[in-house]
Image (spheres, rainbow, N blue to C red):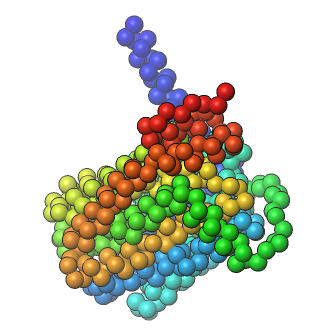
Amino acid sequence: MIKKEARFRGAYNLENFRFVFRALKHRNYRLFFGGQSISLVGTWMQQVAMSWLVYRLTNSALLLGIVGFAGQIPAFLLSPFAGVVADRYNRHRILIVTQTLAMLQAAVLSVLVFSHHIAVWQILVLSLFLGLINSFDIPVRQAFTIEMIEDKSDLGNAIALNSSVVNLARMIGPSVAGILIAVLGEGVCFLFNAISYIAVIVSLLAMRIAPKERRPFSHHVLHDLKEGFVYVFNFSPIKDILMLLALVSLMGVPYQVLMPIFARDIFHGGPKTLGFLIAMSGIGALTGAIYLAGRKSVVGLGRIIAQSSVLFGLGVFVFSFSRVLWFSMAVIFVAGFAMMVQMAASNTVLQTIVEEDKRGRVMSFYTMAFMGMSPFGCLLAGSLAQKIGAPHTLMIGGACCIIGGFLFIRKLPSLREKIHPIYIKKGIIPEVALGIGAASGIEVLPEK
C-alpha cells in the first residue's frame, strides 16, 4: 500500500513538473524562450559590470544612483507612447529593431572599455540610450507574449516562465560576471552581452507569426494616449495594482543599485561578493517564478500580490540590519522571491483583465510602474545613502513596501467585485472566475 502510494505521489509530482513548462508546447514561444535564456545572461553580466565599473571609477553612491536613473528614466517618460505604438504597429518587427539596437549599445561599451577610453559621462550617455530602447522594448515584449501563445489559458504560465528565465539568468550572470571582472575586467562582460543578443534576434527571425488585423489609425496619437490614461485610472483593479507596483519599485527595488556599497564597505568583499549577493537574489526570484508557473489558475493571486509586497519589504528591512554575509544572502533570497512573485502576479492579473485593443497601453503603464519608477528610486536611494548611509536607506524603503502591502489587502474585496464580471464576460474557466474572490475571502459562485 505504501509503495503504491509512493508511486502515485511520484507520478503526481512528475505531472506537476510538466505543467510548469506547458507554454513551451507553442513553437514561437519556445523559440523566444530559448533566445532569451542566452541573451539575458549577458544582460545581467552587463548590469553587474556597469555598476562595479561606475563605483570603481568614482567611489560615489550618488553616481551609482544617477547612472541607474539615466538608464531607467526613459521608461517613465516614453512608455505610454510605446504602448500606443504597440497597439498600432507590428510588435514582432519592433522587437527585432530594439534588440538589434541594444546589441550595438553593448558593443560600443565593450570597445570603450577595451580601448581604455571609458569615462563616467560615456556610461551615462550609453545608459540613457539603452533606457530609450527599453522604454519601447519592454511594453512591446509584454504585449507580444499573447501573440506567441495559441492557447490563451497558457498565458499565465508563459508570463511566469518569462520571469523564471529572467531570474535564471540573474542567478548565473552576476556570478559569472563577478569572476570575469576580477580576472579579465568589465569589458569582457559587455562583449559577451553584445554577442548574446544574436540568440534572441535569430529566435525572433525564425518565428512564424500569423498576420493580425489592426485597427485603422482613425485618431491622433495623443487621443490614443489619453484613452489609455482614462482606461487605466478609471478602473480601480488596474490602477490599484499599478500603484502598489510603483510603490515597491520606487522604495524597494532600488536596493539593487546599492549592492556594490554593501559588497565592498559592509561585507568587505569585492566583485565576487557583489556577484554572489545579486545571484542569491536571482535564485530567490527564480524560485518565485517557478512557484507561479506551477499554479494552474489565478486563484488567490490578489492576496498573493499583497502578501508578497509585505514579504519583500520585510526582506529588505531585515537585510539593512544584517552584517553577516551568509545571513544577508539568505534574506536577499527571500526578498528576491517576493519581488518576483509580486511583479509576475501583477502582470498576470493585468493581462487577464485588460481589453485586447488596449493591451499595449496597459502594459506600457505596467512598464512605467515597474521600470519607470525605478530611476526615481535609484536617485532617491543614491542621495539618501550619501547622507544617512545605505543600511538606513534600505530600512526606510522596506518599511514603505510593508505599509503598501497592508493597504492593498484592505482593497481586495472591492477589486474582486469589479474583476469577476470581466472573467464571466470573457468566458474564462470557472476557477479563474473564482480567483479574486478566493483571494479576498469572499465566496463567488460559478456561472451555470
The answer, for residue 434, to whether it is visible in the render is yes
Number of residue marks: 0
The extreme top residue here reads 1
Name the spot of residue 296 as percent of width and height, x first: 54, 36
Which of the 4 image quarters holds residue 75? Answer: bottom right
The residue positioned 76% from the left and 78% from the top of the image is: 220
> Which of the two residues, 23 or 439, is positioned nearer the viewer here?
439
Name the spot of residue 396 as percent of width and height, x first: 26, 68
The residue positioned 52% from the left and 75% from the top of the image is: 76
The answer, for residue 115, to whether it is visible in the render is no
Above or below: residue 387 compared with residue 97 = below
Quarter of the image with the C terminus is top right
Quarter of the image with the N terminus is top left
The residue positioned 61% from the left and 49% from the top of the image is: 352
Above or below: residue 191 compared with residue 238 = below
The residue positioned 36% from the left and 59% from the top of the image is: 404
> Which of the two residues, 185 or 293, is positioned nearer the viewer here?
293
> Which of the two residues, 278 or 295, is positioned nearer the viewer here?
295
Q: Is residue 206 left or right of residue 58?
A: right
Above or below: residue 250 compared with residue 433 = below
> Which of the two residues, 317 or 404, is positioned nearer the viewer here?
404
Q: Is residue 430 left or right of residue 335?
A: right
Name the spot of residue 432 as percent of width and height, x first: 58, 38
Name the spot of residue 79 as percent of width and height, x first: 59, 73
Q: Is residue 194 left or right of residue 277?
A: right
